[in-house]
Image (cartoon, rainbow, N blue to C red):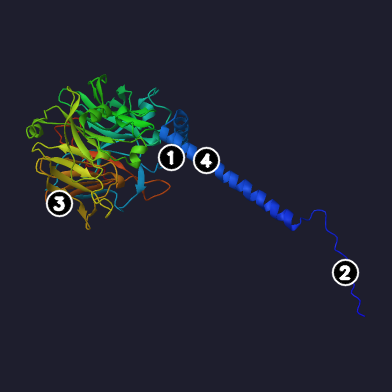
């Protein structure tokens, strides 16, 4: 008879878990996870409803996040030697003058400002520096009550300028580290010392009338949406055109938001740029002359043309009536510096005319009456394609040539009506730590000797220096 012996049971450790208990613990953990996910989903839905309703709690949270991001970005940029929006990797090996065809180039002085310092530089046609106005922000404004916080000098530059016959210069200061980014307007003497300052958030551009009045773009931060753009919501940068007396006193300030709201030119779409608060991005103000005005019934000499970049519009404002009296779109995308010409056309820098199909910019001369493109220049493979995503400007010279500022890569060039480059200059400044980094050139304009009589004809140093025989 076979006897079966049962093995003794293995003792169960006190901390071991039976299968039913294990399944019950897993279920509890899954239930807790589902509860957390459900609570998170409800929080997201609650936040969405608060945003749609634009409640005070949502606005406070949103504005706090925006402010924190802006402060972090600002401090990061201030710590850099070369703030990224003021410096770029150079496209060119050349520095200084690249070419100067004396017979075809328009003779005069080329004045420019760049992102490496708050200065205006004057060149002769040989690319030699004949004068500088050095005026760091902290030198001009010992205190700056209009600024939200202190910004280091390396992050403030002169965006636009206007010279006078006696050597004074108007200088418009900007930064890339605060919102609003306009920093003020100052009249400087020939040595760069301040004569007066205008404490407002001036930005992008200015123009000066024959009577000495100054027309300048200004801006202000709105924590609540403007009535014209209530559907966009959020904090917004409201923009104005201001009129300033020759001695720096504000005479008039007109809201471009108000003008657009009354004009009927509002578009229906809302872009991500709008949601950032930068809705219009006005970047140009130009006085309209009698020649241009004679081509359009509603336009008068003394009106101002303003570019609303983000709407791809050039509008004309009657400052007495305080209304937009004329507007046009054109063959451009996010343009800069549309200039009303005496023949009724507009000359403009079309930054992104390819709309992403290729990397290229161009200058266009456009007839709003016929929608005809009269002239354009976009460079070529030999002289490098013209390219600047932001900033930039152009000037039609008395001999018919066009002086072009390719801001992003610090290049100035003069081209004929046939598109031949007859004068070219590349900003010679490079970063000390990153040799191929070059500062942007904000704008360049050419003036005759008669317009700037304080600049005496420059004598080359090798002629001016007296030598002694051994």
Q: Are marks 1 and 3 in contact (CB under 8 Å)?
A: no
Q: Sequence order check: which comes first, mark 3 or mark 4?
A: 4
Estimate the spatial distance between the alpha carbons at disc 3 and disc 4, rounded to whole Å: 62 Å
Please, is residue 190 above or below residue 390 in the view?
above
Residue occupied by mark 1: 77
> Does residue 135 show up?
no
Residue occupied by mark 3: 419
Q: Residue at x 21, y 38 (%)?
A: 313
Q: Sequence order check: which comes first, mark 2 or mark 1?
A: 2
Q: Sequence order check: which comes first, mark 1 or mark 3?
A: 1
Estimate the spatial distance between the alpha carbons at disc 3 and disc 2, rounded to whole Å: 102 Å
Estimate the spatial distance between the alpha carbons at disc 1 and disc 3, rounded to whole Å: 38 Å
Q: Residue at x 90, y 72 (%)?
A: 5
Q: Secondary structure at mark 4?
A: helix
In this view, the residue in front, 292 or 42, is 42
In this view, the residue in front, 265 or 66, is 265
Q: Secondary structure at mark 1?
A: helix
Residue occupied by mark 4: 42
Residue occupied by mark 2: 7
Closer to us: mark 1 or mark 4?
4
Please, is residue 321 above or below residue 50 in the view?
above
Q: Are marks 2 and 1 in contact (CB under 8 Å)?
A: no
Q: Secondary structure at mark 2?
A: loop
Estimate the spatial distance between the alpha carbons at disc 2 and disc 4, rounded to whole Å: 57 Å
């Amino acid at each position: 008879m076979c006897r079966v012996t049962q093995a003794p049971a293995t003792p169960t450790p006190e901390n071991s878990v039976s299968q039913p208990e294990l399944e019950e613990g897993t279920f509890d953990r899954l239930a807790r996870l589902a509860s957390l996910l459900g609570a998170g989903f409800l929080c997201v839905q609650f936040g969405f409803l608060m945003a749609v309703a634009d409640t005070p709690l949502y606005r406070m949270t949103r504005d706090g996040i925006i402010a924190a991001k802006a402060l972090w970005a600002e401090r990061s940029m201030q710590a850099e030697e070369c703030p990224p929006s003021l410096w770029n990797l150079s496209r060119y090996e050349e520095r200084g003058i690249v070419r100067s065809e004396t017979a075809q180039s328009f003779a005069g002085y080329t004045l420019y400002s760049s992102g490496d310092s708050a200065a205006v530089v004057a060149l002769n046609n040989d690319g030699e520096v004949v004068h500088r106005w050095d005026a760091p922000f902290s030198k001009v404004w010992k205190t700056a009550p209009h600024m939200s916080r202190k910004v280091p000098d390396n992050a403030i530059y002169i965006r636009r300028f206007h010279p006078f016959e006696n050597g004074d210069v108007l200088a418009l200061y900007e930064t890339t580290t605060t919102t609003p980014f306009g920093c003020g307007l100052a009249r400087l003497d020939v040595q760069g010392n301040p004569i007066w300052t205008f404490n407002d958030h001036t930005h992008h551009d200015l123009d000066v009338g024959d009577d000495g009045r100054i027309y300048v773009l200004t801006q202000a931060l709105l924590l609540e949406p403007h009535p014209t753009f209530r559907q966009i919501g959020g904090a917004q940068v409201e923009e104005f055109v201001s009129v300033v007396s020759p001695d720096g006193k504000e005479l008039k300030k007109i809201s471009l938001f108000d003008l657009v709201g009354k004009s009927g030119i509002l578009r229906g779409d809302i872009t991500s740029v709008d949601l950032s608060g930068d809705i219009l991005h006005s970047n140009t103000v130009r006085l309209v002359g009698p020649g241009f005005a004679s081509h359009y019934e509603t336009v008068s000499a003394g009106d101002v043309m303003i570019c609303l970049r983000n709407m791809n519009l050039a509008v004309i404002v009657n400052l007495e009536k305080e209304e937009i009296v004329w507007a046009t779109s054109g063959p451009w995308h996010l343009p800069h510096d549309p200039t009303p010409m005496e023949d009724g056309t507009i000359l403009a820098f079309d930054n992104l005319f390819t709309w992403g199909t290729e990397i290229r910019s161009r200058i266009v001369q456009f007839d709003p009456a016929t929608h005809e493109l009269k002239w354009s220049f976009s460079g070529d493979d030999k002289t490098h394609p013209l390219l600047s995503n932001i900033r930039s400007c152009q000037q039609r010279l008395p001999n018919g040539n066009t002086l072009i500022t390719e801001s992003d890569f610090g290049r100035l060039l003069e081209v004929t009506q046939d598109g031949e480059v007859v004068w070219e200059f590349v900003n010679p400044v490079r970063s000390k730590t990153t040799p191929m980094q070059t500062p942007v050139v904000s704008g360049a304009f050419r003036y005759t000797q008669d317009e700037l009589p304080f600049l005496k004809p420059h004598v080359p140093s090798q002629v001016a220096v007296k030598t002694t025989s051994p």
